[in-house]
Image (tube, rainbow, N blue to C red):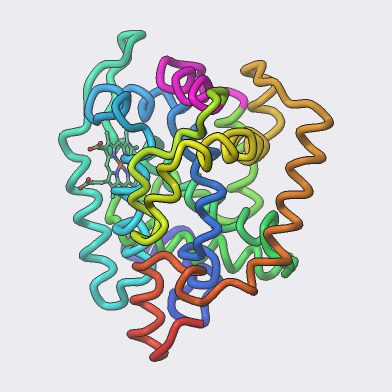
Amino acid sequence: MDRTRPAQPAAPLGPHSLLWRYAGDSRIAFLGGTIGLLQLMHPAIGAGVLEHSNFFDDPADRVFRSLPRILGAVYDGDEAATTGREVRDFHRSIRGTDAAGRAYHALEPATFWWAHATFQFMAEQVADRFDRHRLTHREREQLYREGVEWYRRYGVSDRSVPPDRAAFQDEWERVCAEVLEMNEAVRFVLAALEAPLAPLGHQAGIPPRLRPLADNPVVRRLLARPSRIVAVGGLPAMVRKRFDILWTPADQVQLEVMQRTIAWTWPLLPATARWQPRAADGWRREVGFVP
Ligand code: HEM
């Protein structure tokens, strides 16, 4: 057997790929709360973040600080694999024992893959929920295979990576049903989402000129309810049910109105606001402008 041949067929990344079209789109901000929760619900990630980060001081800071390099593994061209390996190496010391006495390590393949799976989900959800284009079956498969290439750039064993989009779905549902747990970190985020002021944290992911606005208490009050609706509404229904997270038909209507409004008005924003900085750098380098 050829041992160098990868088990999962990956698709190339670049300006023509679907991953370039969705992963660095600033609408991923609407998925931040959801994927943060799905990551923290994984027992190893919940424990790792509680023990190794400033999580309680600023829960959103971790996401904003990590994002440029996570997107770098998609958009950094010849440097992308170097970026990916730097991300991996950062996690070598993230290990310990969780509150239930189970040993964990961030680089254990199934654990690291779950964090990646949530980023893959994030890119696909930008298209499914906040964009007017409907992915065909073939495009969904392509986006998945491009995500396999993204994962490979971290240089972590890909033995936990499902071979195709259908197998990804099966594994996604299994983890949601059997592995995810309620824990202290998740309870903290859910409580923050119920608070009267939106938990916007440091706002490192927001363009500098908008940061004073995002720190303004009136703006944070106005954003509190939509933040909860978008974060909780993005969770798989099975996860909300398992952990008894309140979700009403009125919440669902509000979510759908917000999604549709964003999908229709997004193209009116200037191009620079529509892309995360690391993605914009990639577009400028490869095609000379930001689409
Ligand atoms: C695809 C999978 C993952 C990616 C792309 C990723 C990415 C990152 C990045 C870019 C950083 C920022 C490093 C820095 O500040 O210099 C980071 C920090 C961190 N990651 Fe991950 N990570 C992944 C999986 C995991 C897993 C599985 C765990 C836990 C078991 C974990 C726990 C942490 C912790 C605790 C920090 C430190 C946060 C802090 O300093 O506040 N990560 N991650």
**Residue drawn where x is 72% and y is 49% of the image:** 258
Residue nearest the viewer, comparing 208 with 109: 208
- Residue ranking furthest to the bottom: 288
Where 199 falls versus 72 (above or below)? above
Above-or-below relation of 107 to 289: above
| Picture residue at 55% right of the left edge, 25% below the top | 196
Q: Residue at x 24, y 49 (%)?
A: 88
State the image quarter where residue 59 is shown.
Answer: top left
> Looking at the rendering, which quadrant does residue 155 occupy?
bottom left
Q: Report the label total.
A: 0
Q: Is residue 53 visible?
A: yes
Which of the image's four quarters has the N terminus? bottom left
Residue 145 placement (x, y as % from top left): 53, 64
The overriding secondary structure of the stretch rendered in magenta is: helix
For ligand 1, the image quadrant comes to top left
Magenta highlight range: 177-193
Residue 33 within the segment the image draws in magenta:
no
Seen from the viewer's position, the closer of residues 212 and 96 is: 212
- From the viewer's side, name the closer residue of 227 and 99: 227
| Residue 188 is inside the magenta segment | yes
Q: Is residue 105 above or below residue 73?
A: above
**Residue farthest to the top?**
100
Q: Is residue 230 left or right of residue 213?
A: right
Please provide percent x and percent y for residue 30: 56, 49
**Residue found at x 70% / y 62%:** 263
Kindly tell me whether residue 48 is visible in this rendering.
no
| Left or right of residue 68, residue 275 in this image | right
> Where does the image place residue 245, in percent across and percent down from the top left?
65, 20
